């Protein structure tokens, strides 16, 4: 995207984020990686509905300022994503109420309850808490960025990213919509998860349609290799169900953990 177009589109996205209550005050930030590799980003301490094209900050990929505007202190999370994902050209960070509720409750958005989410977004894991605007936050995110298109950050908010600004925004919107439906479904007795064969069909559809590639079939595979921890994704893991790490710890899939807990509950009756 060229710089002038990006300036206009960032203002549009910022206004939408504010109007939909994804951000309040000076919360949140948006950035675009321009065609020449520079980063155009929202300015610090500025309401996203009141930005101007001239107020946007311009930096290089290391965060070095290239104009006289000061970027958000959370630009580091955007730069991490750009460095980890060559395919990403835009990042949207916000505090949408329902998605953030999952984040402060310590929950990932990982239940396979909506076909559209499996098709277009996939699992949204929870990154461990890190102080905003510090290396703690980016280090907590680092293992997950390569394998997911959106993340929740514990006790903080959400971030989504994509091949262009509107794909990033749409993924943020899908994350929030899914979180809202999940919360409402719990008030009605709980959501019914899609069966494994239906999930497989949806994965096949999304790959043929180009929504997500084969690398998303097991979004946590690379994460597993690095940490020996199972991401609680609703999608099937192509690797063995249980894994033993070098320190003797055993990892279980979500389904195996539920079965073990069920057996323990039955035995305690």
Image (cartoon, helix red, strand yellow):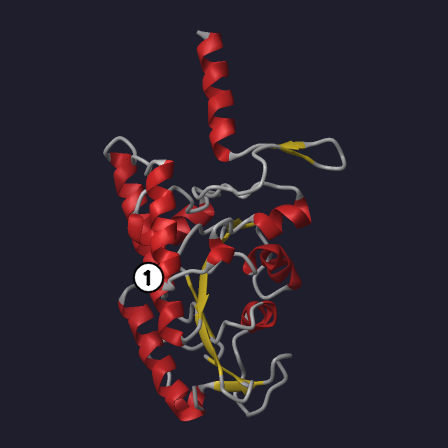
Q: Position of residue 247 (x, y in %)?
A: 76, 35
Q: Position of residue 130 (x, y in %)?
A: 60, 55
Q: Position of residue 55 (x, y in %)?
A: 44, 88
In terms of image quadrants, where is residue 206? bottom left
- The outermost residue toward the left is 188
Q: Nearer the viewer, residue 193 or 158?
A: 193
> Disc 1 designates what residue?
173
User: Does 194 sit left or right of 56 as displayed?
Assistant: left
User: Does 66 sit left or right of 33 as displayed?
Assistant: right
Q: Residue at x 58, y 91 (%)?
A: 66
For the N terminus, the quadrant is bottom left
Position of 228 relative to 211 (above/below): above
Q: Position of residue 38 (x, y in %)?
A: 55, 86
User: Does 137 sit left or right of 175 as displayed?
Assistant: right
Q: Residue at x 40, y 85 (%)?
A: 6
Position of 224 relative to 121 (above/below): above
């Amino acid at each position: 995207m060229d710089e002038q177009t990006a300036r206009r589109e960032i203002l549009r996205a910022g206004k939408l984020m504010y109007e939909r209550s994804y951000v309040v005050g000076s919360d949140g930030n948006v950035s675009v990686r321009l065609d020449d590799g520079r980063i155009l980003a929202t300015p610090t301490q500025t309401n996203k509905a009141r930005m101007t094209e001239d107020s946007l900050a311009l930096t290089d990929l290391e965060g070095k300022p290239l104009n006289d505007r000061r970027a958000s202190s959370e630009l580091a999370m955007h730069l991490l994503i750009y460095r980890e994902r060559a395919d990403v050209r835009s990042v949207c960070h916000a505090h949408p109420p329902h998605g953030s509720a999952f984040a402060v409750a310590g929950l990932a958005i990982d239940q396979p309850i909506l076909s559209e989410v499996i098709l277009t977004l996939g699992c949204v894991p929870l990154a461990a808490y890190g102080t905003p605007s510090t290396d703690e936050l980016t280090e907590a995110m680092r293992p997950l960025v390569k394998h997911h298109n959106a993340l929740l950050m514990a006790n903080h908010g959400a971030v989504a990213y994509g091949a262009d600004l509107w794909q990033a925004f749409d993924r943020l919107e899908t994350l929030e919509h899914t979180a809202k439906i999940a919360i409402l479904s719990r008030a009605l007795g709980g959501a019914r998860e899609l069966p494994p064969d239906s999930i497989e069909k949806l994965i096949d559809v999304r790959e043929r349609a180009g929504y997500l590639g084969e690398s998303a079939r097991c979004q946590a595979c690379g994460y597993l290799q690095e940490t020996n921890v199972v991401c609680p994704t609703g999608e099937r893991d192509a690797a063995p169900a249980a894994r033993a790490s070098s320190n003797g710890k055993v990892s279980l899939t979500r389904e195996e953990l539920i079965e073990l807990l069920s057996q323990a509950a039955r035995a305690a009756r």
